[in-house]
Image: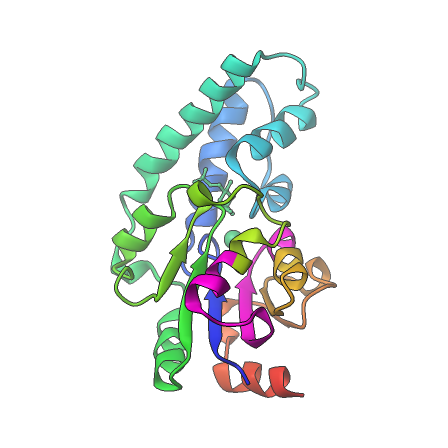
Amino acid sequence: KLEAVIFDLDGVITDSAEYHFLAWKELASSIGILFTREDNEALKGVSRMESLEIILRLGGKQDAFTLKEREELAASKNDHYVQLIQRITPGDLLPGIRQMIDDIRAKGLKLGLASASKNAFTVMERLGLMEEFDVIVDASTVVNGKPHPEVFLRAAEMLGVHPEFCIGVEDAAAGVEAIKRAGMFAVAVGPEENFDKADLVYSSTAELSLDKIMEAYRS
Ligand code: G6P
Ligand code: MG
């Protein structure tokens, strides 16, 4: 029987995926790399340093910077990102998310967050959601990034729920893989073709329906 729903943050609860994109795009451009919205798909759910590696490879500059320089580039992207997320307010929940949280609560299910971001607590605070979630796991306390299942498993463990009785919600291919490897039911948000591993795909958060998700989970 279903006991908990565990959400990804960036791109599911709020549109911070867009701020990650803007910050990476500017960083890439500063080192002469053209970085597009399509390129950005591969970065969703991926850690900060790994994201930088992907961008450098894209521009054929994987060997152009020392580790120290790469750390500075990542820090500069993060400074910009931290600036951008100061704009987030409780009004910035993506469509359908408020309803989902209320429905999950009304059904007596537990609510968790599993984010690959080190800025997850800041974003959750800006959204006014700190009190509403039973558990928040961010990148600072896990060793392995998505698609490794660690962050979802940790959230389930802290909720005291067996993974089998959890649903995970993600907008990243790496995230959906992490949910499946954790042994959970995976709900994906985004274009169908990105998510062959998901149990259920919604084109946007506005389409999310807890009743339908629970029905699919049971069958
Ligand atoms: C999330 C986002 C990624 C981001 C990662 C690290 O998973 O989907 O795009 O790179 O977090 O975020 P951070 O805030 O720690 O740089
Ligand atoms: Mg995401």
Q: Which residues are drawn in magenta?
A: 154-175
Say if the magenta span includes residue 169: yes
How far across and down, in percent of the image, does residue 136 sit? 38, 57
Q: Nearer the viewer, residue 165 or 49?
A: 165
Q: Residue at x 35, y 85 (%)?
A: 106
Residue 158 appears in the figure = yes
Q: Is residue 19 left or right of residue 84?
A: right
Above or below residue 148? Residue 98 is below
- Looking at the rendering, in which quadrant would you find the N terminus? bottom right
Residue at image x 48%, y 63%? 157
Report x, y in % for residue 67: 55, 15
Image quadrant containing the C terminus: bottom right
Residue 92 figure quarter: bottom left
Closer-to-camera residue (77/140): 140
Figure check: 88 above or below 215: above
Is residue 74 in the magenta section? Answer: no
Which residue does the image show at 37% across and 74% down from the upper left?
A: 101
Residue 107 in the image, given as x and y percentages of width and height: 40, 86
Q: Is residue 95 visible?
A: no
Count of number-bearing discs? 0
